[in-house]
Amino acid sequence: MKKYIFILLSFINILVFNIQAKTDSWVKRLEPTNWWTDMKQSELQLMFYGEGIASAEISVNYPGVSIVGKQLTDNANYLFLYLKIAKETIPGKFNFEIKKGKKKQIVSYELKQRRNGSAARKSFTEADAIYLLMPDRFANGNMANDSVTGYIQGVNRKELGMRHGGDIQGIISKIPYLADLGITALWTTPLFDNNDTNYSYHHYACSDYYKIDPRFGNNDDYARLSETCHANGLKLIVDVVPNHCGSLHWWMKDLPAKDWFNTWPTFTNSNYRMTTWTDPHASESDKYRLSHGWFAPNMPDLNLQNPLLFDYLRQVYTFWIENANIDGMRVDTYPYNDLKTAARFIQSIRNEYPNMNVVGECWVKSPAEIAYYQSGNNNKDGFDSRLTSVMDFCLKDVFSAAFNESESWDGGMARFYAHFAQDFVYANPNMIMNFLDNHDIDRYSTSINRDVRKFKMALAMLITSRGYPQIYAGTEIMLDGIPGNYEGHRFDFPGGWATDKRNAFIPEGRIEKENEVFTYLKTLLNYRKNNPVLQNGKMKQFIPENGIYVNFRYNDQKMIMIISNNNLDDKELSLNRYSEMLKGKNVGTEITTNKTYSLQTAILIPAKSVIVLDVN
């Protein structure tokens, strides 16, 4: 009888414990939400969040997993646990036992099997053509997630500053369209949770790093987007934002530490003067305000010099690269960070993925400043950004001006010549991202007043230039915009919504000018895709004369001659001047028209046009 009473009491104790464990579940968050075995970085930081968690004792019993460190902050509701995951550790689920006084809680965790060859994954290169899109403004594939309970903003397409409803499913449905256009890599602006009160559609103010915003879809949808890209020959690039999060991040209700953010007695914005990093005469106070001032009032400035935050954010992007099988990174507002810390941050991720290429947004105004941020540039101060690629904002300025100007010593096509003449400053000119516009600047169509001839000239120069092209969603149809207005750069793509009056994703839905531009760009992109000479071939240029600029791309197998006539009338071009490149060459075929030109006579170049010749 005593035996049965003991068993009964034991059962009651277990039942009481289980009820108590559920009742006393004070661990509210555990991040990362899962991890993987066989990572190069064998140490894993786990952030436990819950009332008074700092005083808890945590233990784990799983082969190959051991606790090597416990870090506390000035907030008792956080505990940072560091684990060592041995190389031989087998993937699986296990439990953390958490004790706090007489309370006890079991929290489960999972180590997943890493993909084969994950660390050695290939990244985007100079061979790629990148398509940039803002998910909210591209296509709505799931109207059921337009408005979600608990999220402040729903859909209102009548207002440019409101959410419009584009989502991951919409992007997935258009991947074949991008592949047909000749795109080989996709960069989307951030997809993380962003529950801001206003302008949440842009998603640069994250409110949860381990959650895809439900108005876009879910974490599995993001992985599915990656799979669809890969199945169609595209790579996927993640937008990395190390400088700031959002003011409605869940941290803001209970900060992990007093120094989690860069703080000031009163709100202080950045001075936005990135030149201070390269200015040999810059004051320390100017540098400090650049890197520690806030980008905007709703974007708290992250203090990556806090080692706990550094490890946390490093793991965030490692998590998404691994979880969604990402192929490359674009880093937002790189120079707004403390540069040495930013470089260490990027390198810490690349240590896990040695082949990962990273392009940085360094919005400065001279090639020398841009070059400072490309890794391998041998800067005088010894700084190495760890960015393998940088965005050419200076070339963007050339595009905006050149075709609107009369020819002069330093205007019109002379701008291109002068710009490319400064390529000596770059460690690798082939790994420069070229673009006409993006989500932060005026639509290129507005800068040339929707002149189709000028637009096509720009496309030809963009696709044939050294470096690799980035196409902003809608450029392929010369999408309009409103100059000087952020939301004016971010119009919806026509046809991305079932209720749209027309569908510009198909020829029948485009007007004549749009089809002309689309076909022209598609031809250029697919030619570039199949011809390495436009990916990493050498370049030779000749000083523009009489409004005509000639340059060549060439390698051992092929030569391309690009002739640009920026005049308002047709011009006859004698080819004698280019004999050093054309010696022994008799014929050239224009790649967008298939028209054949004799290279033994002068060529008539139509006004405001670019001829791209495949020289036989």
Image (spheres, helix red, strand yellow):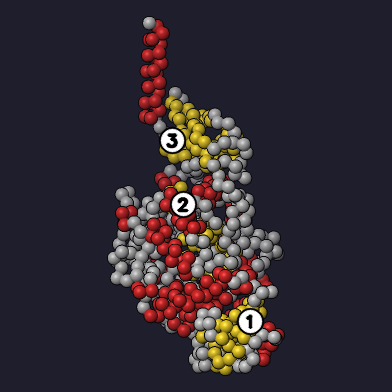
Q: Quadrant of the N terminus?
A: top left
Q: In which quarter of the image is residue 162?
A: bottom left
The residue positioned 55% from the left and 58% from the top of the image is: 328
Circle number at residue 616: 1
Q: Residue 505: x and y, percent? A: 39, 69
The residue positioned 50% from the left and 67% from the top of the image is: 183
Up-down relation of residue 345 to residue 419 (above or below): above
Element type at mark 1 = loop
Distance (Cα) linking label 1 and label 2: 44 Å
Circle number at residue 66: none
Residue closer to the observer: 49 or 135: 135
Q: Which residue type does callout 2 highlight?
A: Ala
How many residues crowd mark 3 within 10 Å: few (<14), some (14–19), many (20+)?
Answer: some
Q: Which residue type does callout 3 highlight?
A: Val
Q: Name the residue under label 3.
A: 27
Q: Quadrant of the C terminus?
A: bottom right
Q: Which residue type does callout 1 highlight?
A: Asn
Considering only order in the chain, which callout, 3 or 1, is on the residue closer to the N terminus? 3
Q: Mark 2 points at which residue?
A: 223
The residue positioned 64% from the left and 91% from the top of the image is: 600
The answer to whether residue 369 is visible is: no
Element type at mark 2 = helix
Considering only order in the chain, which callout, 2 or 1, is on the residue closer to the N terminus? 2
Distance (Cα) linking label 3 and label 2: 28 Å
Q: Residue 115: x and y, percent? A: 55, 47
Q: Residue 430: x and y, percent? A: 62, 69
How many residues crowd mark 1 within 10 Å: few (<14), some (14–19), many (20+)?
Answer: some
Considering only order in the chain, which callout, 2 or 3, is on the residue closer to the N terminus? 3
Query: Of all residues shown, which one is farthest toward the top?
Result: 1
Distance (Cα) linking label 1 and label 3: 70 Å
| Relative side of 238 to 601, left or right | left
